[in-house]
Structures are given as structure tokens and as C-alpha cells.
Image (cartoon, helix red, strand yellow):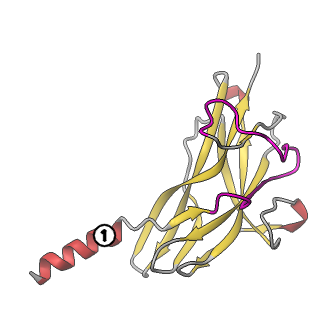
Amino acid sequence: MLALGTAVLYGWLRTYAPLSVVGSGGFAPGPGLAADIEPVTGSGGKPVFIPVYRKERPFDTAFTLHNTGRFAVTVTGLASSPADSALAPTALLATDSSTASADPSHLHAFTRLRLDAGDTAIVVVRWGLDCARATGEASADGVLLRYDYLSLFTRTERVRLPFAVTLRCSG
């Protein structure tokens, strides 16, 4: 019976997914993105950021990450995205801003982020654009984050963002 209980607990701990994003007011676009984009048809009620495509020019979005779980987690960075995507997160950045902001003067290199149970922190995702790989339109409303917990487990979790990003390529 003890072995069964241990196996169930271990299985639950391996699928532990405590990360979420604070929705209302817990996100912001970086420079070059309109701040007051209204939800569009088909967006599920989410605001949509539509960056202006400029070759080799990424853009940033900030959001408030929340640990809804019972254990502390250490976010170690982004999980790798498909190499053939026209729109993909390319870097995770830290900010010293006290509100969700992707202002370049507040951004810093991301190393590791420890979130105790119930903690929140603002993080910034840098998005890469590549219209050469696009077939008309590409969009994303989540990021894959890597994290460690309980000194035993490393997981990748898809965190749904309270906004969507859409890249429209023409020609």
C-alpha cells in the first residue's frame, strides 16, 4: 500500500503545473506595439498585439507570472520553440519595473527566477519575427517555460497569455 501511495504521489509531482499568468492589468506591450488593442473576432476575448514587421527586429511583451501551486518553483527560461515558426519567443528577460512593463530601460538579462507558493513576478518575452517562414499569418497566445521544483523535477509548461500576438506578412 505504501508503494502504491508513493507511486501516485510521484506521478502527481511529475505532472505538477503551477504556473499561470495574472490576466487583467498584468500584461503590457513593449515599444512599437499599440497599448489599447481591443479584442478582435476570433480572439476569444483576448487583446491582440499586431507588431509591424521589420526584418531582424524583435518586440517585447511583459506579463505577471504567478505560482498557484503549493511548492516553490525556479523558472530557468524558455523551452525551445519550433525552428520553423514565423513568430516565436526567443528570449526571456527580467525587469526592475514594479508594474507590467517592457520598457527597454528596465530590462535585464534573465538568469533564474524563484517563485514561492503564491508569489508573482513580472517577466518579459522577446518575440522574433520572420516573414520568410510565414504563410500569410502566424499567431501565439502562450509560451513554453522551463522550471525546477523540489530539487528533483524539471518540467516544461505551456503558460497561456492573457493576450495574443499576431504577425501578418504580405507579399
For the stretch drawn in magenta, what is the main secondary structure?
Answer: loop
Residue span colored magenta? 22-44
Quarter-of-image position of residue 111? bottom right
Does the magenta-highlighted stretch encompass residue 144? no
Q: Is residue 147 visible?
A: yes
Q: Quadrant of the N terminus?
A: bottom left
Nearer to me, 171 or 132: 171
**Side of 69 relative to 116 (left or right):** left
Q: With respect to residue 43, does 7 lie above or below?
A: below
Q: Position of residue 90 (x, y in %)?
A: 67, 51
In the current view of this chain or complex, which residue is farthest to the right?
105
User: Between 150 and 163, which is closer to the camera in this rendering?
Assistant: 163
Q: Which residue is mark 1?
A: 12
**At numbered mark 1, what does the secondary structure look like: helix, strand or loop?**
helix
Amino acid under disc 1: Trp
| x and y, in percent, of residue 159 in the image | 55, 56
Residue located at (64% from left, 41% from top): 45
- State which quarter of the image contains the C terminus: top right
4 vs 86: above or below: below
Residue 111 seen anywhere in this rendered image of the structure: no
The residue depicted at 71 percent of the width and 61 percent of the height is 26
Position of residue 4 measured from the top left corner of the image (x, y, whole percent): 13, 75
| Residue at image point 84% right, 44% down | 33
Q: Quadrant of residue 6?
A: bottom left
